[in-house]
Image (tube, grey):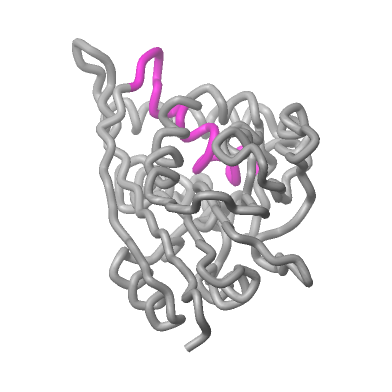
Amino acid sequence: MTVRPVWDPQQYLRHSGHRTRPFLDLLARVDLPAPARIADLGCGAGNVTALLAERWPDARVTGYDNSPQMLERARRYAGPRLDFAHADAATWAPGKAAYDLIVSNALLQWVPDHASRFPVWLDALTPGGVLAFQVPGNFSAPSHTLLAALRDSARWRARLGGAGERAGAVLEPREYLTRLAALGCDADVWETTYLQVLHGEDPVLDWVKGTALRPVLTALAGDPEASAAFVAECAEALRDAYPAGPHGTVFPFRRVFAVARKASVPS
């Protein structure tokens, strides 16, 4: 079952500090003194797109997303040089526009075979322009494997049909490096595991409600009783996998980063 998740900006932003940190670490590796045009693919609620506009106030920044709910929230940040538009990263092509920076924050794991889009996006960059992205690399962590096991259990399999299946959603860092280098880029690829300390009742459940759990919640949206039952089962499993400690619940989160600079002169 292919389910396009319905996003909840308010839920997603409940952990905005942790979610923004990898973007800031990505941005710290982008060395562009004065880009004229910037595209943010998968801008979400617009909070990180606004950071691009703050860093490069003279640039024209456009945030793209395919979620009406996220775009509605994002447009609160719109200004003279910052706008937002509907687009699907799986098919987005910039046409005649040329960008100095194309950035994507925690989006590409939702785009099947996203690496096949790299040539299109690189073609849209000016010479010396940069493609920068970060994706979660934690699909083998309990937060995902327990969710998948529950979704595929006898009780839920027929109802959910694999909604939100994420196997192979991202590549390993070496594969990203290989693909970007083969396209003529000077590529910097790395990974980081953040030991996020979450607080509150069932904090890991609260985290996945904003991301990994969205396809299931979307599929069960018309049945509140079933949705509540699934969430309760998921909460119990996550509680066991991520026990609370004296200072909060530690939630390791691996991220994969890439900054690829297009050649200044065609080879």
Residue drawn at point x = 61 percent, y = 69 percent = 126
Q: In this view, does 186 lie above or below 246?
A: below
Q: With 61 as the anchor, is 117 left or right in this view? A: left
Task: Give the left or right position of residue 34, taking residue 191 as reference.
Answer: right
Query: Which residue, as the protein is rendered here, is positioned at the far bottom?
Result: 267
Residue 154, can we see it?
yes
Q: In which quarter of the image is residue 259?
A: bottom left
Q: Which of 250 and 53 is in front in this view?
A: 53
Give 125 or 74, whichever is nearer the viewer: 125
- Estimate the x, y position of residue 188 in percent, counting from the top left: 33, 62
Q: Report the number of numbered marks.
A: 0
Residue 48 rendering spot, x and y as whole percentages: 57, 36
Q: In this view, does 166 lie above or below 187?
A: above
Looking at the image, which residue is at 65% across and 34% down?
A: 45
Residue 133, given in percent of the width and then of the height, sits at: 47, 55
Residue 96 picture location, percent across and down:
78, 71
- Depth check: give the residue in front, 266 or 40: 266
- 102 relative to 233 in the view: left or right: right
Q: Does 207 lie within the magenta span?
A: yes
- The relative height of residue 42 versus residue 113 in the rendered view (above or below) is above
Q: Is residue 210 magenta?
A: yes
Q: Is residue 12 above or below residue 151?
A: above
Question: In the figure, is residue 242 to the left or right of 267?
Answer: left
Rendered-image quadrant of the N terminus: bottom right
Is residue 41 visible to us here? no
Report the residue at 32% width, 40% height from top.
253
The answer to which of 160 and 109 lies nearer the viewer is: 109
What span is in magenta?
198-219
Q: Quadrant of residue 127?
A: bottom right
Q: In which quarter of the image is residue 37?
A: bottom right
Which residue corresponds to the image point at 39% horizontal and 28% vertical from the top-left?
A: 204
